[in-house]
Amino acid sequence: MSSSDFADFVKRQSERSNEPEIDWEKTKDEWLQRLSELYKSVEGYLKDFTESGQIKIQSVPIYLSEEKLGTYSASKVTIDIGAQHVELVPVGTLLIGSAGRVDMKGPRRTVRIVLADRDSDAPRVAFRVFDPSKPQTAPAERKVNWTWKLVSEQPQIRYLPLTEEGFKAALLDVADA
């Protein structure tokens, strides 16, 4: 390695340090807000059954730990349908390919619910390969409209819209023994 290689490296790193910092507290707050919105949707989907006493929904505090966010309090939701017990357990927000994930865990299996781009129907991960000796241009920023989606089974993973009908079908799938 030559002195100029090292000087170029230092220059690139210095330029990167001038990039705007990520507001991790804001990231966490947005994640918790979206999580709350998911739970409100679930309560709406099951309202007729909770009002009649056939289903009980309870929010239970838990702690999540993520590298940049630290340890923080979130809520998991328990859904009791007779003897069946299902949990909506948040996994986190700093994930590859989505802005968050919640696992719907029942006695039969687990279904994933992800916070994905409204326009996507499957996981997508993009990357760039660049030559550090050439000037770089930042990729165009694209506004992402995040929405909750159900994740289909492997091997062909697909995102399905989270609707009342889809949620109830997934709930039946994880709970019906």
Image (spheres, rainbow, N blue to C red):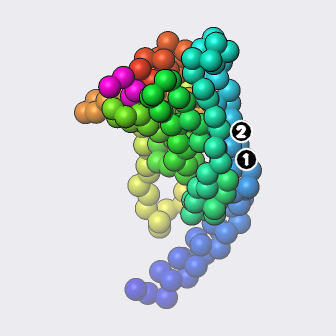
- State which quarter of the image contains the N terminus: bottom left
Relative vertical location of residue 126 with respect to residue 17 in this rendering, above or below: above
**Residue 171 makes an appearance in the image:** yes
Q: Position of residue 93 (x, y in %)?
A: 57, 47
Which residue type does callout 1 highlight?
Asp
Task: State yes or no: residue 129 in magenta.
Answer: no
Name the image quarter holding residue 147. top right
| Local crowd size for mark 1, using a 10 Å CA cut-off: few (<14), some (14–19), many (≥20) | few
Q: Which residue is rendered at x = 59% and y = 42% of the image?
A: 76
Q: Which residue is mark 2?
A: 33
Helix, strand, or loop for circle 1?
Answer: helix
Please name the amino acid that badge 2 sits on. Gln
Q: Quadrant of the C terminus?
A: top left
Residue 14: percent from left, percent from top: 65, 73
Disc 1 target residue: 29
Q: Which residues are magenta?
A: 173-177
In this view, the residue in front, 41 or 106, is 106
Residue 17: x and y in percent read 67, 69
Horizontally, is 120 left or right of 56 in the view? left
Pointers 1 and 2 in contact (C-beta within 8 Å): yes
Q: Indicate the position of residue 74 as horizontal and vertical percent values.
A: 65, 48
Residue 159 against residue 136 in the figure, above or below: above
